[in-house]
Amino acid sequence: MPVTITQRAAEVGTTRTSDWVTVGQSMIDAFAEATGDRQYIHVDTVRAAATPFGGTIAHGFLTLSLMPMLSQRTEGLAIEGVAMGVNYGGNRVRFLTPVRSGSRVRGHFKLLELTEKRPGQWQQTTEFTVEIEGEDKPALIAEWISQLFV
């Protein structure tokens, strides 16, 4: 059930977790095609098998770009009355562990700050962490800023 923007503002420090999503080779190949980044560690399964990764890995920016999909698969992140949300930028992004093709990932979203910039416009800062099933370290940690218009 969606909450109001003022209810969400009171939830600073709250973390919500998405469902698991599989990052398969077809997703990696589609991202390579869309971005022009066809480095062999992403798209050449034979050659990538000989690397320390043991196979192809997702692009770091592909992992980061999963943020909207993972947020849609996270219960309780919907805010009532939001007409539009736009990316404003990131304070920090760190790629810690590669996501191997076929891995399952999920997102953790921790609300760090939500402030009203002007009537009807709010700025939200979220810590976004991508967990890889079975791995000790996350794939990435990012501090991301969004503008929400209500």
Image: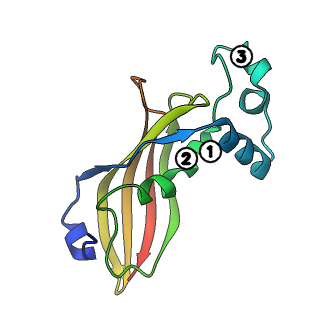
Residue 24 appears at what percent x and percent y? Answer: 62, 37
Q: Real-space Cα distance between discs 2 and 3?
A: 24 Å
Tell which tag, 3 or 1, sits nearer the viewer. 3
Q: Is residue 147 above or below residue 102?
A: below
Residue where numbered disc 3 is placed: 49
Residue 37 appears at what percent x and percent y? Answer: 78, 41
Mark 2: secondary structure: helix
Residue closer to the observer: 56 or 122: 56
| Residue 56 picture quarter | top right
Residue 146 shown left or right of residue 38 in the figure: left
> What residue is rendered at 79% in x and 47% in y?
33
Residue 65 appears at what percent x and percent y? Answer: 57, 51
Q: What amino acid is labelled 1 in the image?
A: Phe
Mark 3: secondary structure: helix
Residue where numbered disc 2 is placed: 64
Residue where numbered disc 1 is placed: 61
> What residue is rendered at 74% in x and 41% in y?
29
Name the colour scheme: rainbow
Q: What amino acid is labelled 3 in the image?
A: Ala
Q: Real-space Cα distance between discs 1 and 2?
A: 5 Å
Q: What amino acid is labelled 2 in the image?
A: Leu
Q: Kindly identify which numbered label has been placed on residue 143.
A: none
Residues packed near mark 3 inside 10 Å, few (<14), some (14 to 19) or many (20 plus) = few
> What is the total number of numbered labels drawn onto the structure image?
3
Residue 75 appears at what percent x and percent y? Answer: 31, 58
